[in-house]
Amino acid sequence: MPKREFQPQTAELPTQHKRGRLRFTDFHLVRNPQGGCTVEVELEWTDGVRVTGRATGQSSEVVDLRIAAEAALKAIAIFSEGALDLELIGVKHVRAFDANVVIVAIANRKADGPQRLLGSALVESDPVHGSVIAVLGATNRVLGNFIATR
């Protein structure tokens, strides 16, 4: 029996049905001498539109993760102009399989999708940055559906 080689089918979708995604473009964490911190997360849409979410709070190793996740959720809320109603349930930095992982749990308070979202990110050196990546991973499908119907 002769071998057949796999030939992938690449059909281009019509422009109006292409799905895009928000890109994570910038991240700033500033700690102040009074023990607080401010995190800014910038996301960019395909046509160059940039949105920035900002969150502040008292700084600690654990709380900084939460502040960064909140900043990412605020950027998503700004992008969706309030159409997405997402709330951070929790964020956790764990050691698993000889790697550092940040896990986030998010509540989706809109009825048109999953009510609980979970995201994770492997982190090598910066768990605070990893919490933003975990939020984007958790919200990827909900954001994709929002963008597709926009």
Image (cartoon, helix red, strand yellow):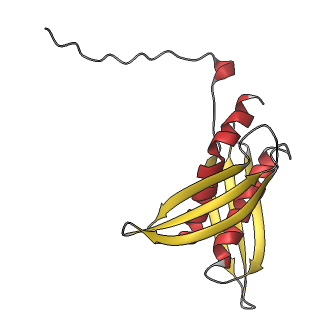
Q: How many marks?
A: 0
The image quarter in which residue 3 lies = top left
Residue 52 seen in this snapshot:
no
At x 73%, y 61%, the residue is 88
Looking at the image, the residue that sits furthest to the left is 1
Q: For the N terminus, which image quadrant? A: top left
Location of residue 50 in the rendering, given as x and y in whole percent from the top left corner: 72, 48
Left or right: residue 147 compared with residue 98 = right
Looking at the image, the residue that sits furthest to the bottom is 34
Looking at the image, the residue that sits furthest to the right is 82
At x 63%, y 39%, the residue is 21
Up/down of 25 relative to 89, above or below? above
Residue 92 seen in this snapshot:
yes
Q: For the C terminus, which image quadrant? A: top right
Left or right: residue 71 compared with residue 135 = right
Left or right: residue 146 compared with residue 1 = right
At x 59%, y 55%, the residue is 119
Location of residue 115 in the rendering, given as x and y in whole percent from the top left corner: 74, 47
At x 64%, y 56%, the residue is 135
